[in-house]
Amino acid sequence: MNLSDLSFASAVEVGALPDMLTFTPDGAKVVIANEGEPNDDYSIDPEGSVSVISLPEFSLTAISFTDFNAGENRNSELPTDKMVVDGYNASVAQSVEPEYVTISQDGSQAYVALQENNAIAVIDMATLSIERIFGLGFKDYSIPGNELDAGDLGPESIQFVSADDSPNNHPLIIVGNEVSGTTTIYQIDVTLLQAR
């Protein structure tokens, strides 16, 4: 939309079932979470994906999860002990359902909630590729003390907090979990990320 006269500017076709979008801090890109949710009987199960539209030219970069499918080159990187990879006869790319996106303050990374998978995908905004996927883990409810704790399940929203804005001077990721109705705060170890 042209803001000067509210006229149509351009349309860009993105992945299946776009669920959420956000702009990078500099306004140069739009990042879209394409949920790719299956229909009720799984007769249609599109792949989840992330789309990035560069402005003002409206060029599209499609970011796929197919490299994480069984037999593909990044499948061994999946933290399957800390995330859910299921789906009825589904590949990993069909199983992931990107739900929400937040961008780091410097615009270098996007964090994408993979709600049904209990995981976060980190997108490198310079290369427009998936840097890594990390699982949010599970709890053993049979351990005393865990009985009433539903755990942090189903990340629905993510907010990045820079070290400058953080109360403890460390960058944070705040995750709102739809399934468990909880909020989780993760402190980011910058030295660990730089070592990867």
Image: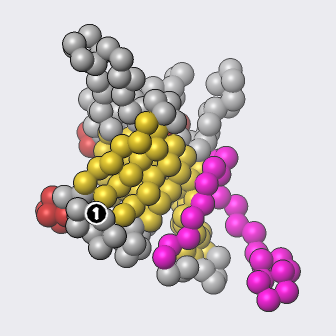
Looking at the picture, how far across and down is residue 105, in whole percent? 39, 72
Q: Quadrant of residue 92?
A: top left
Residue 175 place in picture, x, y as percent: 41, 47
Q: Residue at x 39, y 52 (%)?
A: 174
Element type where label 1 sits in the image = loop
Camera-nearest residue between 48 and 117: 117
Residue 55 appears at what percent x and percent y? 60, 80
Q: Position of residue 7 (x, y in %)?
A: 85, 80
Q: Nearer the viewer, residue 85 or 70?
A: 85
Residue 37, relative to residue 58: is it above or below?
above
Image quarter of the N terminus: bottom right
Query: Looking at the image, can residue 75 be seen?
Result: no
Q: Nearer the viewer, residue 152 or 81?
A: 152
Q: Is residue 132 visible?
A: yes
The outermost residue toward the bottom is: 4
Q: Which residues are magenta?
A: 1-25
Residue under pointer 1: 167
Magenta stretch secondary structure, dominant: loop
- Kindly identify the amino acid type of the residue bearing the numbered disc 1: Pro
Quarter where residue 168 is shown: bottom left
Q: Indicate whether 191 appears above or below 59.
A: above
Q: Quadrant of residue 162?
A: bottom left
Residue 149 belongs to the span the image colors magenta: no
Q: Give me the residue at 77% from left, 84% from top.
A: 3
Left or right, 80 with respect to 49, comes to left
The crowd level at tag 1 (other Cα within 10 Å; few <14, some 14-19, many 20+) is few
